[in-house]
Amino acid sequence: MKNYELTLILKPELDGEALNKTIQTVAAFIQEKGGFLEKQELRGKQRQGILAVLAFSLGAEEIESIQKRIKEEKQIFRSMLIIAPKKRTQTPTIQTAPKIVSQEQPRMSVEDIDKKLEEIFK
């Protein structure tokens, strides 16, 4: 099964009941074909039409029948069916703190430090 995203542009003069009926008809057909509807979203009414998006998972062999069914719907002006990008799931990783390698040098005596300072300032 692949993830798909179906974008529909419906007639702008549709009222709420006819709009819902058309979207539910398409969603029901997808589910009849064995699809799993993940998201159904109405994105609003524009001057040219009403935009609706359906996200679903379905076997590739059923896509052609879905496209034919959408073309039969008189309330749909245009449609676009794409393979949805894969959702990136990051597996949690345990990050260990970087190991700090102790590079301890032997401690210098006060006299050695004084000698070094005299060398530097001369």
Image: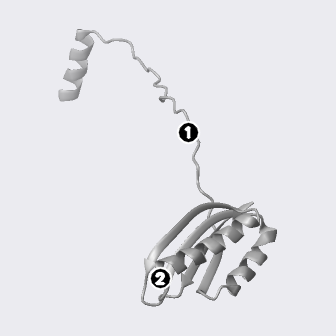
Q: Nearer the viewer, mark 1 or mark 2?
A: 2
Q: Which residue is mark 2?
A: 15
Nearer to us in this view, 14 or 109: 14
- Residue 100 image offset from top left, x and y in percent: 45, 25
Q: Residues within 10 Å of mark 2 (few under 14, many from 20)?
A: few
Residue 65 rendering spot, x and y as whole percentages: 78, 77
Outermost residue toward the right in this view: 61
Residue 101 drawn above or below residue 62:
above
Q: Residue 60 location in percent, x, y? A: 78, 68
- Splitting the image into 4 quarters, where does residue 78 fall? bottom right
Disc 1 is placed on an element classified as loop
**Does the CB distance between marks 1 and 2 fall below 8 Å?**
no
* Image quadrant where residue 80 sits: bottom right
Query: What residue is shown at x 42% (from left), y 89% (from top)?
Result: 47
Please name the amino acid that badge 2 sits on: Asp
Question: Residue placed at 23% from the left, 10% from the top?
Answer: 110
N-terminal of the pair, mark 1 or mark 2, is 2
Left or right of 75? Residue 64 is right
Tag 1 residue: 92
Quadrant where the image shows the C terminus: top left
User: Which amino acid type corresponds to the residue marked 1 in the rendered image?
Assistant: Pro
Which of 13/47 is in front?
13
Quadrant where the N terminus is found in the figure: bottom right
Mark 1: give few (<14), some (14-19) or many (20+) Cα within 10 Å. Answer: few
Q: Is residue 73 above or below residue 61?
A: below
Please tell me which residue lies in front, 64 or 30. 30
Q: Which residue sits at x=22%, y=27%?
A: 120
Specify whether residue 83 is in view. Answer: no
Q: Secondary structure at mark 2?
A: loop
